[in-house]
Image (spheres, grey):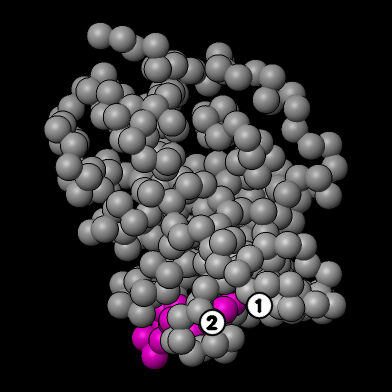
Amino acid sequence: MDLTYWHKQTMDAPLFPDLQWSRPEHKKHAGKLLIIGGNLHGFAAPAEAYIEANRAGVGLTRVLLPDAVKKIAGNILETVDYAPSTPSGSFSRQALADFIEQSAWADSVLLVGDFGRNSETAILLEKFMSKLDLRKIARSQGKSARADSGLTEGEVALATSKEGRPLPLEISWSGDGGALGKSSKFTGPVVIAKDAADYFLNTPKSAFERPNTTFVVSMAQLQKIVSGLDLPTPVTFGMDLLKLVDTLHQVTKNYPVSIVVKHLNNILVAVGGQVSTTKLETDLPVWQVKTATHASVWLIQNPSKAFEALTTSLLD
């Protein structure tokens, strides 16, 4: 069996040491991360991600929570904004405009979890994660749409930011109303963790076909995801490391998605058919939020080296 795609790393023997020495020296060059998550009954994941992002060396961080938690959250986080919520306290479909406006500011978006289970949130995340290349649609609006906006060809101002500048967003007309009257999709890097991944278990292809997407998932989540991809080898809790490496190789060779998963005291990273395994010195029963956050920061700072960035982030 050809295993040239399998790369092994330990905590004291990095695969890509040069990446560790080429990090931004100043925060203004360290990138901007938008963290989205939380619901009325809990927002521990976004709060933890905010702390971890700063530990990982990000330049600027914003947190977006449903407005149902505003009274509870108070001033716990320094840079937090709120988006419309459902009566049960999860993000509503009307939050799409806020998702888009905030993501226009960011270099990457982390859907970190604690979303709860809500049908409106499911619709919201599906729209936000659309794989459609909307640049073509934006170009079709013509130069008149960009008049006096300062935007370049292929960009349309959907709204203005809080600083008063037009936001260069890629849009499609949906007619579904909302604060902006349009449906927009964020096409930048997105990292998905914890129960955010659960929203795509039944329709994994829709998210797996979207470029610039990283799933940080448990083995149970990966098992459900792979079962919907029509692969010959199912994921099982009892499979050995070699079989899992081969499965991840096949998945990421066929889909433009990145996967991070923990199994047998290793964390595996798969991108473009390449797979790395990082042996843990001690088991990490709670690992997804920290791993996803550090992955987000390293992807921001190494946008053309996803495999190397995700693998090296595990040593951070």
Residue 93 colored magenta?
yes
- Position above or below: 77 against 238: below
Residue numbers of the magenta segment:
85-102
Image quarter of residue 186: bottom right
Residue 116 colored magenta?
no
At 44% from the left edge and 32% from the top edge, which residue is drawn?
271
Q: Please state, as top left, top right, bottom left or bottom right, where the C terminus lies in the image.
A: top right
Q: Please state, as top left, top right, bottom left or bottom right, where the N terminus lies in the image.
A: top left
Instruction: State the residue position of label 2.
Output: 182
**Side (left or right) of 187 relative to 53:** left
At 32% from the left edge and 63% from the top edge, which residue is drawn?
199
Q: Could you say where residue 306 lies in the image, as x and y percent from the top left? A: 55, 35
Residue at mark 2 to residue at mark 1: CA–CA distance: 8 Å
**Side (left or right) of 195 relative to 94:** left
- Secondary structure state at the residue bearing disc 1: strand
Which callout, 2 or 1, points at the residue further toward the start of the chain? Answer: 1
**Side (left or right) of 180 relative to 144:** left
**Side (left or right) of 221 relative to 305:** left
Three-letter amino acid code at the position of disc 2: Lys
Between 295 and 273, the residue placed more toward the observer is 273
Three-letter amino acid code at the position of disc 1: Leu
Q: Are marks 2 and 1 in contact (CB under 8 Å)?
A: yes
The disc at residue 241 is: none
At 31% from the left edge and 9% from the top edge, which residue is drawn?
2
Q: Is residue 20 visible?
A: yes
Instruction: State the residue position of label 1.
Output: 158
